[in-house]
Amino acid sequence: MWPFRKRGEPKPPRTLRRSFVTPEGVDLRLELGGAGARAAAFMLDAFIMLVILILVTIAISYLIESGEAQILEILWLIGFFVLRNGWFVLFEISGRGATPGKMALGLRVVARDGAPLTGGAVIARNAMREIEIFLPLSFLLYQTSQNAADAFLVIFALLWTGIFLFFPLMNRDRLRIGDLVGGTWVVQTVRSKLGADIGADVSRSAEDVVRPRRTFTDAALDLYGVYELQTLEEVLRVGRPEAIATVAAAVRNKAGLADDGDDLGFLTDYYRALCVRLERGMMLGRRRDNKFAPAVGRRA
Amino acid sequence: MNAPAETLLLNASRFRAAHEVNWKRLDGIVTRIERRGIGALTEDDLLMLPLLYRSALSSLSVARETSLDRALVTYLEALCTRAYFQIYGVPTSFWTQLKEFFARGWPQAVQGLWRETLASFVLTLIAAIAGFLTVIHDPALFYSIMPDSMAQGRDPSASAQALRDTLYNSGRQQDGLAVFATALFTHNAQIAIFSFALGFAFAIPTVLLIAYNGLMLGAFLAVFTAKGLGLQAAGWLTIHGTTEIFAIILSGAAGFRIGTAIAFPGRPGRTDFAFTVGRQASVAMAGTVVMLIVAGLLEGIGRQTIQVDWERYAIGLAVLTGWLTYFYLPRNRHVAVS
C-alpha cells in the first residue's frame, strides 16, 4: 500500500503466493492466509472467548451467592483482562503461532523475515486489535447503554472500524495494522496428505497379463503439454465420473481414437503415456508448458 | 512402493518410491511437534529432524524440476513449510523469553525510549500544573475535568474532614478496596495498551490521553490543596503513584515512538521501521502492565497498612528509585543471548 512501500520497491504480486527462500536456498513459495479465512478465524476466536466469558460469569455469579464475593469479583476482573488481552498473545507466543481459531483454519502467524516469532512482535500485533475492534465496539456499547448513540456516533464508529477492518484488503500482503507494526504475516500451513501415485502401476501389476497397457501414437501424445497433463491429473484424482467421461470423449475425439467403453482406464493410460513423453522431453531440456507450445518431438 | 521397479514407468514414480519413507517420517515428526510440542519427540527423532528436513527440501527442488505430478510438489511444499517453521520459526520457550524480558529486553526497551519518555513526562507535568492552576482559580471547572466515577465525592464541595477521611484509613470503604484496586489496575492497564495502540494515529490520541491524565492529577491535588491537605494528598498519591504515573508516562512514550516512526520513518522506509520500532515499543508497553500490577499491590495493601505521611513518601520514592535504577543503570549490552 502506498504510504507503506518504499519508493522504487516492486509491488508484491496479486496472488497470495509469496517467494520465501530458506537458509538452504530453496524457495518455499508461502501461501498467505486469505481475508476470508482470517476473518473466519477471528470470528471463531471471538465466539470462543464470548462463550468462556459467559460461562465464567454465570459460574462466578452463582458462587457469589455462597459468599467470598470479594475474591470472586477480583478473579472475574483479572480473568476478563487476561481473556481480552492474553488470548491472542499467549496462544501465538506458544510454539504453534496460532490461536484456536487460526489452528482450525490452518493459519499461522510468522515473522515476515522468517526469524522466530518474538514476544514483542506478538504483543505489538495484538495490542493493535484494541483500536481495531475493541475500542469502537466498547465505545458503541457504552453509548448505546447510555441511550446516547446518535446516528453520527454510530456512523463514526462504523467508519473507524471499517478502515481497520478492511485494511487487509487494501494491501496485497493482507496485512492488518497489527501485522504492520509487529512485522508479521499470516500464512497457510495446511497438513496435506500425499495422494496416491497415479503414474505408478501398483494396482494393476497383477492383471497386467489380462489387460495390456494401451499404446498411443506420437501424434496422439503431441496434442497436450504440462498444463493439460496436470489438469488431467486433477480430473483423475477427483474422480467424478461425468468429468472423466467428458474429458475422455474430448481426448478421443481430438486424437481420433475409438471409444473402448473404459473411460477411466483409457485416461489413466493416456496420462501415463503423456507423462512419460513430457518427462523425457524435460530431461532433454524441452519442457512443453501447454498445448500451444511446439511439440516435444519436433524442433522449434 | 511395493511394486517392482520395472513397473514404475515414470521418473516421478521412481523418485517418489525412493524417498516416500523419509517424507512420511518427517510428516509424522512434524505432526507430533505441532500437536504436543518438541518434548514429545524421542531423541532419535530429534536428531533425524534436521536431516529429514534437508532431504525433503532437496526432494522439493528435484521434484519441481523433474516431476510433473503436481500433487507431489504441493505436498512437498506444504511439508517443507511446516518443517521450516518448526525448525526456524519457533520462538524460544515461554519461560526463557520471560527471563530474557526481565533481564534485558524490558530495561533496554525503556532505555531506547528515553527521548519519548522525557517528552511524555514534560507533557504530564505541564498538564498537571495547568490542571492545578485551573481548579485553584475556578473550582467549578473541576467537574468538567474529572468524571464522577473517578472523583467519588472528592470534589471541591466536600468538607476538609471528608477529604481527610479519604486519605487515611477510617475503615469506611475497607471492604470494597481490594476490588477497587483490581478494577483500577485493569482500567489503567487497558489505558496503557490503548495509548500504545493509539500511537498509530500519528500519536495524536496518545498526546491527548497523557495530557488528560496530567490534567486530572493536577485537578485532584488542587482540590486537596484548597483545603490545606496538599502535602498529605501528595503522600497518599506517592506511595503507588510514582509507579503508576511512571507506567502511564512510559506507555505514552511507547505510543509516541510508534507515531513518530509512522509519521517520519526516515531512510529505512515505513514498513521496515514500523515493525522494528513496534516490537521494541511493545516490549516497553508490556512492561508497563507489570508496573501497574505492582502499583495495584502497593495501592491495595500498602496504602491501607501505612498511615503515616513520611512513610508513604519514603516507600513511594524508594520504589521510584528502584525503577529508575533497574531501567537506566548502564549494563553490559553485549552479553551473548543464548
Image: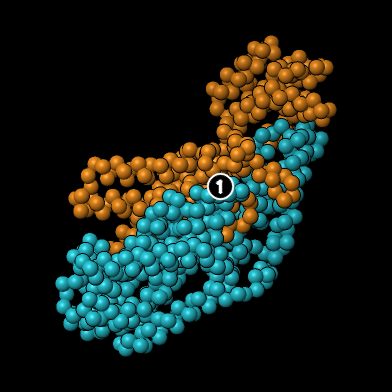
Chain colours: A orange, B cyan
Residue B155 in the image: x percent, y percent? 20, 71
Q: What amino acid type is highlighted by mark number 1?
A: Arg
Q: Is residue A190 visible?
A: yes
Q: Tell me which chain the residue with mark 1 is part of.
A: B
The secondary structure type at the circle numbered 1 is helix
Pointer 1: what residue? B270
Residue in view at x 54 percent, y 43 percent:
A4
Pick whichever, A56 or B237, lies toward us. Answer: B237
Pick whichever, B5 or A42, lies toward us. Answer: A42
Q: Quadrant of residue B11?
A: top right
Farthest top residue? A256
**Along the horizontal axis of the image, is B62 left or right of A14?**
right
Answer above or below: position of A154 versus B245: above
Residue B187 in the image: x percent, y percent? 34, 65
Residue in view at x 42 percent, y 45 percent:
A164
Pick whichever, B238 or B139, lies toward us. Answer: B139
Residue B41 in the image: x percent, y percent? 65, 63
Q: Quadrant of residue A197?
A: top right
Residue in view at x 55 percent, y 70 percent:
B107
Quadrant (top left/top right/bottom left/bottom right) for the C terminus of chain A: top right
